[in-house]
Amino acid sequence: MFPDVCENAADPQINTRLFTICTLVTRLEQYTSFVESFIAGGFTPETSRYLYISNIGSNTYEAYAGLNLMIAQATTPYIILCHQDVTLLKHGYTELLAQLAELDHLDPDWAAAGNAGGTGKAKYAAHFTNFESKVTKLGTLPAKVESLDENFIVLKRSANIGLSHDLSGFHLYGTDIVIQAIMRGYTSYAIDFHLHHHGEGKMDTTFYRCQAALEIKYNKLFQTRYLQGTCRRILLTSSKFKLAVQQFKTHRKLKRIKS
């Protein structure tokens, strides 16, 4: 049986708690240990809502669709997307609230945060204990990131971001959510929330298929093209030169209007 404090995402309930913790479950014993660890760390039923989707025996939902379903049902200020194979160490509810408060002060426009992410070319920021019980601590936290590791991600619900509807699988949704945040004008950060991730990440064929799909999606989205507006064509391009030419033309028209 699933822990009593957990709620099936197919049976949503309205509540006024602070966190909604969303997890795809394939191993009930792992998920039970995860929930017990989080409750002991202060994420009690009074402060946190636990949502799960059961993939035990077969994959009812892949990550993008399953997590989007739970995100849509969340009514709390913060939404945690979390693997079933993590447990808390010294950091818990109080420490996470402190980290999020620090982010609010540093950058009120943050939308997503996690315990690990990519900050640039071959550069990372992270703090976690891995499956070999080795502590990984990289960079100065908090750090603005271009991607987040999927083992633990916090979303600010008021930012209204979710995962892509046109992607699927179980990999790279931490990258996708950061891009979605950027497109809405928000930022994402790696924060100092140290937990134990017992899983060993594998870059298998499914990973590379997810990578190819993500690259194709965003390359198409950001390729140079014009959108036909109701009055004028609008340029979308990653070319600084083409954008500069277009902006120059726009500024000339503004001057004519003012004169």
Image (cartoon, rainbow, N blue to C red):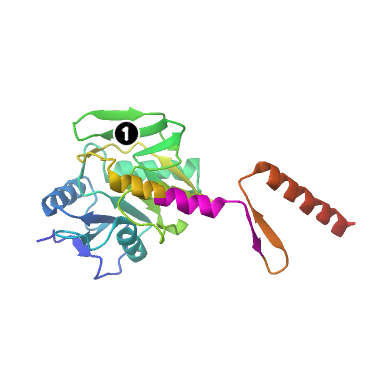
Q: Is residue 216 covered in magenta?
A: yes
Locate residue 2, reporting x and y percent: 13, 60
Locate residue 213, reporting x and y percent: 40, 52
Q: Residue at x 33, y 61 (%)?
A: 65
Give the main secondary structure, helix, strand or loop, of the magenta stretch: helix
Type of amino acid under label 1: His
The span shown in magenta is 213-228
Q: Quadrant of residue 244?
A: top right
Q: Residue at x 28, y 55 (%)?
A: 21
Q: Residue at x 25, y 66 (%)?
A: 9
Look at the image and tell me whether residue 48 can be seen: yes
Locate residue 160, reporting x and y percent: 45, 59
**Residue that extends furthest to the right in the rendered view of this protein:** 259
When the figure is inspected, residue 74 is found, relative to residue 210, above or below; the finding is: below
Regarding mark 1 in the picture, which secondary structure is present there?
Answer: strand
Direction from residue 28 to residue 105 in the image, left or right: right
Q: Residue at x 41, y 58 (%)?
A: 162
Q: Is residue 35 covered in magenta?
A: no
Foreground pick, 182 / 222: 222
Foreground pick, 103 / 190: 190
Direction from residue 257 to residue 213 in the image, left or right: left
| Quadrant where the N terminus is found in the figure | bottom left
Locate residue 228, reporting x and y percent: 66, 65
Look at the image and tell me whether residue 151 can be seen: no
Q: Which residue is mark 1?
A: 127
Direction from residue 201 to residue 181 in the image, left or right: right
When the figure is inspected, residue 30 is found, relative to residue 15, above or below; the finding is: above
How many neighbours does mark 1 have within 10 angstroms: few (below 14), some (14-19), or many (20 or more)? many
